[in-house]
Amino acid sequence: MVELVSVIVPVYKVENYLERCVHSIQNQTYKHLEIILVDDGSPDNCGKICDEFAENDKRIRVIHKINGGLSEARNFGIDVAEGKYIVFVDSDDWIDPDMIELLLRIREMHNADIVECSYRNVYKDKIIEETYCRGEIVIGDSVFALKGMLDWKYFKPVAWNKLYKREVLGDIRYPKGKLHEDEFTTYKYFYNAKKMAYVDVSKYNYDRTREDSITGKKFQASNLDACWAFRERVDFFENHNINQLQEKMNNIYCWYVAESIYKCYCYDIKDKKVDELLSQIKRDILYFGNKKVKDEYLNDLRMINKNGIKYYGKYRQQRINE
C-alpha cells in the first residue's frame, strides 16, 4: 500500500526562495504527497506564489492565515494534515529529490517511528558544512535518541530532516511566540517513538544565507527562550524517570544559562526576559543544590546570583583572556 506523506511548509517573507523549496518537494521520486503550504500572513508575494502552485498541482493545499509565527504555522499544518507520515521543510531550504523515498525505505526496513537524515549547511549556494555522510544507519530506542540529541550526535533537536509517523506527534504542538521552538518540542516526539533510525546521508539543505534569518542575527533577549526550553527538559527527564540522562541534562542546562548570561553582558541586553532568567537562577541554585551537577557550572550560577551580570561578565572576560 502506498502511504500518504504530508509535507508541511510554513511560509513567511521568502518569495526569493519559495519556488526552489516547493519545486524540490514536487520533484520527489516518491509522488504520493500532500504538500501543505501555510502562508503565515506574508506581506510579500508569497501568498500569490502559493496559490499559483496549487492551481498547477493537485497535491498542494494552501492555508492563508493571519501572521502568528513559525510555531503556529506548523501547528496549522499538523492539524489539517491527512498523511500517515509528516515531514517539515522550512521555506528557505530545499530537499534532495530522493529524500522522502529514502526515509520511507529506512522506516520500512526497521519499523521506525521517526527517521532522520544528515543535512548540508549552505551559504550563498555553496556547501559550507556537511554533517557526517558515511552512509551508516543507526537504530535505537527513545532514550538512545535523546542521548544522541544531548551529545549533538545522530539525532538533532530540529523539526526538519525527519520523517515522523503521525502518532508520535499526538497532541504535542510547537509553543507560540517562542524562539528555538524546536528545542521545546522535538525531544517530546523522540520520547514518544519506540524506535528511531538515523541514516548518515545528507538529503536536506539548510540555507543560512538570508540576512533577515533569525539564526543570522546577533544574540538578543529572545534567544533566552532556549534556556527555558532546556529547563523544561530538566523537569521532563525527571518526571519521566529518564535517570540515565538526568545528570547530563542538568549540566547542559546550567552551562547554557551561564553562557547566555555572559552573552547578555557582551551585548548589553536589558530586558524583562533577563530579569526572569535571573529569578529562575535563584530558584535553580536551591533546586540543583542536591542534584548531580558539575561544581563549576553551579558555582557560575551562584556567582551570577550573588554579584550580578556585570561582575560575572567581567570575570568571564578575564578568564577568557588569561
Image: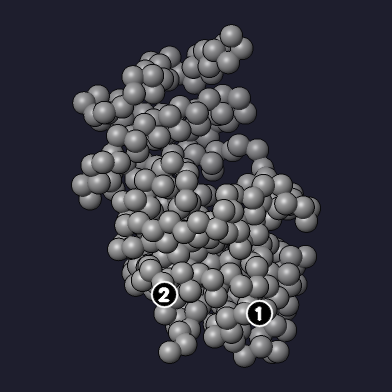
Residue 218 placed where, x, y %?
65, 38
Residue underneath mark 2: 108
Residue underneath mark 1: 26
| Residue in the foreground of this view, choosing between 15 and 157 | 157
| Residue in the foreground of this view, choosing between 273 and 227 | 227
Instruction: Say which residue appears at 62% left-offset and 80% top-offset.
Output: 29
Instruction: Give the SS element for disc 1.
Output: helix
Neighbour class for label 2 at 10 Å: few (<14), some, many (≥20)? few
Residue 122 has which mark?
A: none
Classify the position of the N terminus by image quarter.
bottom left
The amino acid marked with disc number 1 is Gln
The amino acid marked with disc number 2 is Glu
Report the coloring of the rendering: one colour
Residue 44 placed where, x, y %?
74, 68
In this picture, is 76 found above or below 321?
below
Instruction: Say which residue appears at 40% left-offset and 34% top-offset.
Output: 252
Left or right position of 59 against 273: right
Classify the position of the C terminus by image quarter.
top right
In this picture, is 269 found above or below 178?
above
